[in-house]
Amino acid sequence: MGAGESIGQGMRGRWGSRGECRGESAPRRGTRGVARPSRGAAGSRVSPLLSGQVVDLLNQAALISNDSKINILKQVSGETLGLGRGGRRGGLAPALGADVGPPGALTPRAASQWMVKSKVISELQEACWEMVSAMASDIILLLDSDNDGIRTHAIKFVEGLIITLSPRMPDSDVPKRHENDISLERIPKDHPYIKYNVLWEEGKAALEQLLKFMVHPAISSINLTAALGSLATIARQRPMFMAEVIQAYETLHANLPPTLAKSQVSSVRKNLKLHLLSVLRHPSSGDFQPQITTLLVDLGTQQAEIARSMPNPRDVRKRPRDEPDAALKKMKIEPPLGEDDEDKDLEQVAVPAPKASGQGSAQSDTDITAEFLQPLLTPENVANLVLISMVYLPETMPASFQATYTPVESAGTEAQIKHLSRLMATQMTAAGLGPGVEQTKHLKEEPKEEKTAKPESVVIKRRLSALSQGQAISVLGAQGSAANPLEEEAPQTKRLPRWARVKILASLVTQFEVPLKSEVLAFVLDDIRGRLDLAFAWLFQEYNAYLSRYPSGSLDHYDECLIGLLSGLQEKPDQKDGGHGCPVPAVSLLTVVPSQSRTYLGMSTLRDLIFKRPSRQFQYLHVLLDLSSHEKDKVRQQALLFIKRMYEKDQLREYVEKFALNYLQLLVHPNPPSVLFGADKDTEVAAPWTEETIKQCLYLYLALLPHNHKLIHELASVYTEAIADIKRTVLRVIEQPIRGMGMNSPELLLLVENCPKGAETLVTRCLHSLTDKVPPSPELVKRVRDLYHKRLPDVRFLIPVLNGLEKKEVIQALPKLIKLNPIVVKEVFNRLLGTQHGEGTSAVSPLNPGELLIALHNIDSSKCDMKSIIKATNLCFAERNVYTSEVLAVVMQQLMEQSPLPMLLMRTVIQSLTMYPRLGGFVMNILSRLIMKQVWKYPKVWEGFIKCCQRTKPQSFQVVLQLPPPQLAAVFEKCPELREPLLAHVRSFTPHQQAHVPLSTMAILEASAKQEPEAKD
């Protein structure tokens, strides 16, 4: 029997005749004028009485005036359907309308209201009800019509029919114009003609028919849009159907019709998004918000828009909790007097209150399949699925996929895996595959259990004999049905409730020997979700046996049970059940927690135990603290994260701090204590300290240091007593915690001020870490200056705060600074020149680049050897981006004006000219001015002067000619190769120019020229 026919029979009640002939089809409206009968779509059969009335009505309507049409419309909306004006045909025909749209949807509603208000049902009313029933059946059949318009109107009719044949809930979102419309809760359950329960079932059948129509693969875009809107309206006005509507939306999202074009797919997705947002605003959507939100994200909805569409919390709080409408409360219906016997076979079905998906006892096929798939979607399985499916990919991307694809924002998260499992489950269910479909088929094939009103009782037939190991497991259900372990019990024996059976089984398991307990443990872990109640019952029973001092009870048995369950849970892909559900978690959880695949789960469980088990709080905290030095980085980092949060709690702070300091104090031992290797006693072992064992003692301390700056003094105390290897490791790992403290930390400033003897390198390292990327604070500079001048005159203390010192202080410290290790000197210059981060630009420094180079030239050779000064100047010249030609020109100018002339002046001039040849003219000017300052009086500078003239010939000839004759002769003595080129240069002069060359100079040039041939002879 089709859905349309069943609905028709339900609305007709006990009358079954509808007419025999079905020769005519549904009417079709023309563009204008009189309507005419036409052939309907295949499978769209309409009763001849109905089609004749509709055609007659349309022909009449085309000829009447507008005022008459208004009167007819008023009759349609009236509760009597105009039956008083012409009987069945004259009153019902206007109500049917020319199509099956909203006017047609009024008919069942108005007919129901008319029947409810009538205390006595006449034959005319019965006949009218029969006709309305026939019309409803025929219109539902029109969902299969070939005409898009007819199908669209049929969808709207079915929407109205479902709303009319279902009860209104307290949180139903009913438009104001429909507040007074009749619905199922207003129909008395003892009505003499209308059957409440039958109409309720027909309303659900109509919804099922609409859902099947929407997921049809050949549905058109217009019909799909209409169906989406109708389902959203039904979900808002009838929240008990929200689960079915959301599941239908999920199915559609996963299986869009392949016949849709790209633009149609975009339109459907946009409509689906709008309707989901409207459903999300409903107060009853709270239980379905995860599914709705996931769908909206897949459809490209922004999180802000989703948040705006969330229902008002006040509306949600006002919702009655688990309180159905008064009309929906389960009640026994007494049949009215005089009712026919054939009505007695109708069962009185209680109307269920709306249930969220997953909350009811009965799950849908999709839910069952999704739960089956979710734990299987591991990264390995998903990768294999992708590789296998690539073989079947089409050559070109389908338009539907291209239009619907949205990037996955949260791949691998639990919510995304759950959503993926539901998408796959909907596709498998639509294809008739999966455990959900199989289970539904199996349940349909099983005979229904005979209901009885007698109270449940347990019939114990006989005393059970001793059970073997295999029989005991079969009682638990391993060899029979897992869900019904006592399924094969004798018919006369009443099955116990599940909780009672679990309690009995847990008591029996507690008495088992160890081999049998392992069998039971394997049985529980085989389906931990379905048998979790048995696991907890067993655990509590073991603990109860220990407390009651039973012969079989001991804390060891309890520990074995708990550790066995947790160890088995580690192997499961998606278990989130924490250990805080057990009465007293075992301390040996330490062997379970470090699994890297379950790090966060284990730490969360341990954290909950610490806060929720005060009697053993410090015992569990000690377990977590031990994990702070774990060899696996992921476990250790997670433990430190949890410990830092607990360190903020006053009641735990002292214990955590004491534990960290105890581990820090281990570093004063010559060899690592055995406690670092898992031994119970604190004894030293022969193995030497390694970097890993040293870090084990520092992990927790360094994590707490930024939160408690006073701990820095403990480190300084230990540092002074530690061996060299430990000191080197400490200096390497201290950088980040010190930066976390900051240079304004009072405790750190106090450490600098009172630097312990032997901790100088530690304090220096701290200063470097603080000032490596930011300039030193005035307070820090003050403490370091006082330390340097009053207690420890080690110039290395000044390096981190150089940029905070005065210019005079830096110049005074330069001789000591440039005598340090070349790497240290390089760092000094980087800080002064602002190039420690490679920017190549001068930072805030007491000396600019020129002043630094001049200060190096003026260093007293008695305080620093010349070799160190030359190396320092070379470091300056290496910074080409800092020492430009302009800077060097200023430096040479200022050095040349000093008296006495610096020893390295000409070396700097030659280096500058080598770096920037375009400074040649400026250098010639410097040389000329040096002649005026009698440069030959400074032997080292004079030697550099001659070398510079030699390198810059012939440009330097004009400068050499300015020398007095004795100095010119001295130049020729040291560089005789200059004589001939210089004489040739002079002879190239014009007579007028030669007249300006002094005769004494010419005499030296010519005399020198004559001496050369004589020397040759």
Image: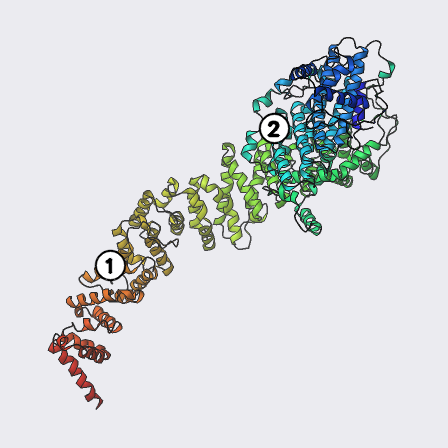
- Tell me where residue 162 sits by quadrant: top right
Q: Going by the image, does 730 lie left or right of 244?
A: left
Q: What residue type is labelled 2?
A: Ser
Q: Nearer the viewer, residue 167 or 745?
A: 167
* Residue ID at (67%, 24%): 239
Label 1 to label 2, Cα distance in Å?
Answer: 76 Å
Give the secondary structure at mark 2.
helix
Give the secondary structure at mark 1.
helix
Near mark 1 (Cα within 10 A), the count class, few <14, some 14-19 or many ≥20, is some
- Tell me where residue 454 sits by quadrant: top right
Read off the residue under disc 2.
278
Q: What residue type is labelled 1?
A: Val
Number of the label disc, if any, that sits on residue 933: none
Residue 515: x %, y % from top left: 77, 41
* Residue ID at (32%, 45%): 783
Residue 328: x %, y % from top left: 72, 18
Residue 678: x %, y % from top left: 59, 47
- Quick check: can you spot residue 195? yes
Above/below status of 951 relative to 749: below
Instruction: Please count the marks in the image.
Output: 2
Read off the residue under disc 1.
890
- Tell me where residue 744 sits by quadrant: top left
Of circles 1 and 2, the one toward us is 2
Q: Which of 735 and 409 is in front in this view?
A: 409
